[in-house]
Image (tube, helix red, strand yellow):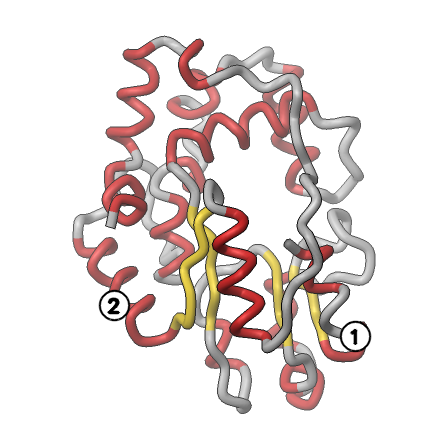
Amino acid sequence: MREALDAVFASSERMYLYPEADLEGAVHPRDFGRLPASERDRPDLIMGHFGFGLHEAITRPARYVTMLRDPLDRVVSLYYHYKTLTPGTPGSPGKDEQELIRVGDMSLEEWVFEAKRPALDNGMVRQLVGYRGVPFGRCPDELLEEALESISRHFDAVLIRGRMKQSAEMLGKLVGTRLPTLRRANVNPDRERLDAIDPGLRMRIRELNRLDNDLFRR
């Protein structure tokens, strides 16, 4: 999706928010608010991994688009992304997770329930409300309603990872042009199939992400 948008927005029109170690030329999300106001207002497109609330640092009218994914598939994919990732770049949060999983020889179950990363506990709802620092395993039900209210008031589209063709068509309408054909990127041939994972573990991961499950279903 990012590659497709590169073809639509000139480099002067876009800004990517990721840790610098993950994407050359990107701005770390935590540093965005420290940029001069003229630089924060410059791009027509801001894309990356960041929580809701960025618009408060921008004086131009700003709207959001997000992409959701089946919560179980999201957690499993993230684990195998880190586990099978080629050696990560120093300074990347992904490298830290990679070392934790590999050096500690952590299973999927251990990583989810012992490492206790907030991103694995209703991570989509957390992003849609601006994270809030809620401890692992403690997300209150009200967060879901707040996330849905956030979408209703501030989002132009909610895209779905499993419906890429329709999502690309919707995004193209929003930016006013047909997006180039999407190629598959970041495909991990070494990840385990969902149906090969212990059913009890699948159920526990879904229960942990009950708010994300409800968000995705709605």
Q: Which residue is mark 1?
A: 10
Q: Which residue is mark 2?
A: 149
Residue type at tag 1:
Ala
* Residue positioned 48% across, 22% down in the render: 111
Which corner quadrant of the image does residue 129 belong to? bottom left
Mark 1: which secondary structure? loop
* In this picture, residue 86 sits left or right of residue 17: right
Q: What residue occupies the far left of the structure in this picture?
A: 141
Q: Tell which of 128 and 182 is nearer to you.
A: 182
Q: Is residue 115 left or right of residue 168?
A: left
Q: Quadrant of residue 113?
A: top left
Q: Quadrant of the N terminus?
A: bottom right
> Dots 1 and 2: beta carbons under 8 Å?
no
Q: Position of residue 114 (x, y in %)?
A: 41, 22
Residue 88, image x, y percentages: 76, 33
Asked if residue 72 lies left or right of residue 213, the reply is right
Give the residue drawn at x 67%, y 49%. 182
Under mark 2, the amino acid is Glu
Residue 196 location, x and y as percent?
44, 9
Residue pictured at 53% horizontal, 90% vertical: 59
**In this view, the mark in front (1 or 2):** 1
Q: Secondary structure at mark 2?
A: helix
Question: Where 214 sits versus 83, above or below?
Answer: below
